[in-house]
Image (tube, rainbow, N blue to C red):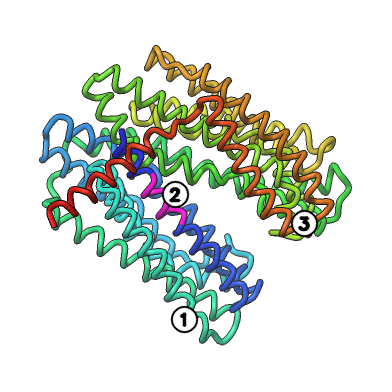
Amino acid sequence: MTSIYKTTAQVTFFSTVEKSLSFFYRIALSRMIGAEGLGIYQIALSVFSVLLTAASSGVPVTVSRLITKQNALGNTAGRNAVVTAGIVSTLIFTVPAVALIFGGQKIFGLLFSDGRCLDVFLIMLPGLIITSVYSVMRGAFWGDRQFMPYSLIELAEDALMVILGCVLVAGAAGAEDGARRAAMAVFISYIFSFAVSLFWYFKKGGKLVSPKGQLKPLLSSSLPVTAMRTSTSLMNSLVAVLMPFLLVKMCGLTDSEAVSLYGVAAGMAVPILFIPSSLIGSIAVVLAPELSENFYKNRADLLRADVEKSLKAAVLIAFALIPVLFALGNTAGEVLFSDSLSGEIVKNGCFMLLPMCLSMITNTILNSMNREKATLVYYFCGAAATLACIAALTPFIGVYSYVVGLAASYVITCILNMRLLKKLCPGVKILGYTLRGAAACAMSCAFGRLLMGILENNLAPFAALTAGGIAVAAFIAAAFLLFGTYSLDPAKNAIKRRLGKLKRKKTRI
């Protein structure tokens, strides 16, 4: 299990660096091409992202699971057939889609209120084909547990986009030209990851063979995941339209006030609340092949142990972050966005992190057990709850109805996922661990709020945020260690092994 912890840490590190690059790149673009240019680029990228989600979002996890199954059976030909089936399945959608959009630009352009957005979108559009094929390679890397090549390619793609984007956009003649150049950087970065991933796949002995026998199971498993993720994108678009409309009609706000309020919630507060998704995603990438292998080989004890460790990791992440956001939320809103409401939403909404983390990790676990259709149905149940909360609660609590709706969605999917998981993998025990974590979390929340109450009254916001963050993090680590929610033994053993290697090396010298 030590190797899994090490690999998870590596994937998390690279993922964090990637997201940091993207964050700073967005700031650089906003300064170089302004709000107008960034808006054109963002609208075009959003539409492209919906198409990409529809084309291939369910493919990597399905390819990973099916490759794990073929590896468990010792079927090399089957493994290659899975990859080929993945490529065929993405090309079936992307090639006709790209051809139709290029051929019907006038009709498709109706989706954009600004014709400049269509021009920028068309620059990125050919990338739909190549990056969909890359998504298959990504799934192959996961299934073969080649996490380092995957992480390096992802980081290199992002770095290339940032560097090339900054160089190209620096010479832009205006907002539209800058958006075009930024789109060119995206397209070139897709070509890079596509080419490097294919080179690595063939270098490691991969082949393209007949997909016969693998295409149908791949489509059967990937379509529900793709449908869920595409529905998520469409759901976000629907909420972006519905929420401001209801704020105007039910709360008496102007259009400008409603859009601004929704921007605070969706653009400032919710991204902070979704911080755990990166950590859960890293764990999911590493553990999915392990879970699939144990499932297909009927290793009940190992599967149960992996499931327990995955759930405990999700619980630990949630309970460790809740006190941080609860204590520092208000101050963080002021420092990061100069907006008190965003911090207030973070502070009040942070308790959804537990069902959120459990919902995300159980989705991965169940998909690894070939239960994609069930998780899709559960997702729609949660989505219905979100829309119901927004429709019913907006007149009473305003924009908070969106946050309550998200929380309700995660609670429902978490309960349904855990119920199914209990049937598939009986004997999993996390109640005691969760209760200990909850006690440590409650103590940390109380300490954090008391401390920040003092610091906020005596220090500048940035100083209070820095000092409070360090103190709260230290208290959380001590409280969780006290309640036995984690152990220092793995770190101690790793240090001992490292020191042992150094001593042996010195002895040989």
Identified by mark 2, the residue type is: Thr
Which type of secondary structure does the marked residue at label 3 adopt? loop
Left or right? Give the position of 41 relative to 502.
right
Q: Which residue is mark 3?
A: 339
Residue at 25 percent across and 29 percent down: it is: 293
State which mark lies toward you, 3 or 2: 3
Q: Residues within 10 Å of mark 2 (few under 14, many from 20)?
A: many
Residue nearest the viewer, comparing 3 with 123:
3
Q: Is residue 154 magenta?
A: no
Residue 493 % position (x, y) = 33, 37
Q: Quadrant of the N terminus?
A: top left
Which of the 4 image quadrants contains residue 246? top right
Q: Main secondary structure of the magenta part?
A: helix
Give the magenta range.
9-16
Residue 37 % position (x, y) = 60, 74
Residue at 33 percent across and 33 percent down: it is: 221
State which mark lies toward you, 3 or 1: 3
Residue nearest the viewer, comparing 255 with 112:
255
Identified by mark 3, the residue type is: Asp
Q: Which residue is mark 2?
A: 53
Residue 208 % position (x, y) = 14, 51
Q: Which residue is mark 1?
A: 168
